[in-house]
Image (spheres, coloured by chain):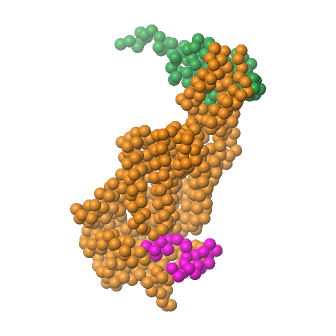
Amino acid sequence: MNYLNKNQIELIKEQIEKQNLSYDPLKDELLDHVCSDIENKLNNGESFHDAYNDICEQFELDPLIRIENDTLEILNKKWDIKTKIVYSLIGIFTLSVLFKFLRLPGSGIMILFSLGSLTLLFLLTAIINLIRRYKTKEQSYLSFTSIFFSFFILSTLSTVLGWGDAFLLRVISLLGSGLIFTYQSYRLVSNHVLYENGFTMAIEKHFKKIEITILIFTIIVFFMILYLPVSPSYVVYPLFNFSLVLITFLSYGATWIFYITKPEKLKEKKKLLLIVSTTLFWFTLIYISQVFPNSILKNIMLWVILMGGGFYGIFNYKHYNNAFSLPIISLLALIIFCILKIVFQLNLIHTSSIIVLEQIIHSPAILIILLIVLHLVRKNIIPRSFSLFLLVVFIGTFPVKSLPNDWLLYKLLKNQPHIVQFIKNAKNQTYNNTYYQKLEHFQRATKTNYFFNASGKYDKNAARILNDLRPTINENDTEKTPYFQWEKNSDEYYWAVYNLARFEPLSSMDIAWGKNRPKNLKISIYRNQNWEEIKNFKIEEINLFSKYSFSLVYATKIKISFKKAGKEKYKMYEWNTYHE
Amino acid sequence: MKSKELLKGTLKTMVLKLLSEKPKMYGYEITQEVKSISENKIKLTYGALYPVLHKLEADGFLVTETEVVDNRARKYYSLTPSGKEIATEKVNEYHEFVKIMAKILGPSHPGLES
C-alpha cells in the first residue's frame, strides 16, 4: 500500500490553495479526497508525477471553486427568497415612479414602502450574512457592501421625501462599496484558475450581485429623470456610471493591475486584457475629468479611446461575450453620434430634428436600448435577468422622460428657426463662447456646494468666483430680483429658451419637493394639452434667479416663467428647497 | 454511464443508504464504494458528492468527526438518529418509485391501447 509523504501532500495542498477556495471545511476534505485518489493510482502502478498531473488537469477542467459554489449554493438555498423580495420591491419602486408621472395616487407611500423595506432588507441581509455559519470571504465582504448600500438607499429616501439631503452618507456608502468591489475584483482575477476565463467569470460573478447593481441603477435613473434639486450633474453622472459600468471598470482595472504586477501569469492572448483594460481605465479617467471644464482634447481622447476599444471588442466579442459588451455599446453609440454630427454639419436634414436626435443619443435610454438589442442579437452577452430589468426600467421610464421632452423641443424649435440657428452657432462655438462658458460655470457652481467650505463658512475665494460670474450685483437686490434678464432676441435669450425647452415636465418635480411642495403649482404643459396656445406665445421675459444661504445646506429658488402682456401666464419651472 | 439526471435525483438516497450500512465513511470512500457496487458504471465525482454531504450535515442528518490519517485530516461522516430515519424513508420511497416506474415503463398497458 502506497502512502503519500509530507512533501507530496504539501504539493497537492499548494495546488488546492491556488484554487482560491475560501470555505475552509471543504478545503481539507478535498485535500484528503485528492490524496486518497492519488494513492489509489499509485497502488495501481502509476507514478506520482503522472497521477499529480492528472489531478492538475482535472482541476483545470472542473475547478474546485465550482464545487465550493455548488456547496454554498445548496447550503444557502433558502436565502434565494431574498432576491425575489428585492426584485418585487424594485418593481414597486419603478411602478411608483411611473405612478408619480401619471399623477396616480399612492406613489408616495409606494416609494416609502419600497425604499424603506429595501434599506431594512439590506441591513438585515448584512447582519445575517455576517453571523451565518456557511459563508465565503466574499460573502463577508458582501455584507459590508450591503451595509453601505443600505446607507445609500437611506440617503436617497431622505432626499426624495424631503427630510434633507444626506450627501455625506451617500458619498461614504459609494466609496465604501466601491473599495470592496475593487478588492474583490482583484482577488478574482488574481486567481490563476480563473484568469483563463477571468474576464467573463469575474464580471459574471459581479453581476450576480445584481440586486445591488440594478438598484443603484434604478435610483440613478430616478434621480436623472426627476432632476432632483440635490442631484448636481457630477454627482448624478458618476453615480449613474457607478451603477452601470463602474463595477465592470473595476474588474478590468484589477485585471490591468494584475497584468502589470504579474505579467508572466498571463498568456499571450491575454495581452488583449491590457488593451481593453487600459481603454476602460482611460474611459474612467475621462469621466472623472468631467469635473473640469470641457476641452477639445478631452473629447478627442474620449472618441479615439472608445472607438479603439470598441473595434477591438467587436472583432473579439465571440470569444469574450460579456467582457466586450460595454465597449461595443459605446462604439455603437459613438458611431450613431458621429453620423448625426456629420449630418448636422452638412445640413442634410432639418436641423431641429438633428438637435432632438442628438439629445436622444445623449440619453441613458439609448444605452439601455443598445444593451437590449445586443442581448437579443447575441444571447448571454449580458445576464438575462439584468437585461430584463433594464427592459422594465426602459419601459417604465424612458417614454415618460425622453419622449415628451424631445417632442416639446422639436415643436419649439420647428416654429422658431432663429433659435435653431442660434443653437447651431452656439454648438459650433461652444468653447469660444464666453457667455456659454460663463453660464456653464455658473450652473456648475449652483449645483454644488463649493462656495462653502467644509465647516459651512462662507468661502472668500468661492465668493470671488461667484461675484465674477454674476452679471450685476446691486445692494438692493432681493431674491425677487431677476438674476438674469436678457435682451429679447439676444443670443443669451435664445440660449435660455433652448435650455428651458429641455426642462422636465413639472409634474415630475412634485416628488422632489416632498413636504415642501408648493400647493398651488399645477402647471403641466403636456397634460393640459394646450400646446397650440403655448407655441403661439410671444415670449416676453424669462427670469431665472437664485439665492444662497451660507450654510452647507443651501436654499435655492429658481423660477422660469413665460409672460404674456406683462402677466405671468405659464410658469414652466419653479422649485424651492429650504433647509432651516 | 448512467444518466446524470437520474443520478442527481438519487444521490442523496445513495449516500444515506451507504452510510446506514457502515458506522462511518469519508468522502473518497463513498465514491469508491459506489464505483465498486455499481461495477464501475457509476463514478461519483467530488463535485457531485461534497455539496450533498454538506447539505445533509447542515440539515442535521449527518455528523462529522475529523481524524488525522496518513499526515492529513480526514473527515468521517456518520448518520444521526434522524439521518437513520430519513435513510430508511428515502430508500423505501425509492423502491416504491421504482415499482411504479416499472409499471408505467413496463410492457404495454391494455387499458391504454386504442
**Position of residue A410 measured from the top left corner of the image (x, y, whole percent):** 29, 65
Residue A523 visible in the snapshot? yes
Task: Tell whether A487 sits left or right of A176.
Answer: left
Asked where in the image residue B9 lies, by quadrant, the reply is: top right
Report the residue at 59% width, 35% height from top. A65
Report the residue at 39% width, 50% height from top. A310
Report the residue at 39% width, 52% height from top. A308
**Position of residue A493 measured from the top left corner of the image (x, y, whole percent):** 34, 78
A423 or A1, which lies in front? Answer: A1
Task: Tell whether B57 sits left or right of A248.
Answer: right
Residue A251 visible in the snapshot? no
Which residue in the rendered view is the most extreme toward the right?
Answer: B67
Colour seen for chain A: orange
B108 in relation to A311, above or below: above
Which residue in the rendered view is the most extreme toward the front?
Answer: A264
A261 or A155, which lies in front? Answer: A261
A260 in relation to A436, above or below: above
**Position of residue A260 measured from the top left corner of the image (x, y, whole percent):** 55, 48
Q: Give the position of the C terminus of chain A as an image quadrant.
A: bottom right
First to last magenta residue range: A440-465
A514 or A226, which lies in front? Answer: A226
Q: Is residue B104 magenta?
A: no
Colour seen for chain B: green
Q: Is residue A457 magenta?
A: yes
A49 or B28, which lies in front? Answer: A49
Q: Give the position of the N terminus of chain A as an image quadrant.
A: top right
**Position of residue B50 measured from the top left corner of the image (x, y, whole percent):** 63, 28
A420 in relation to A112, above or below: below
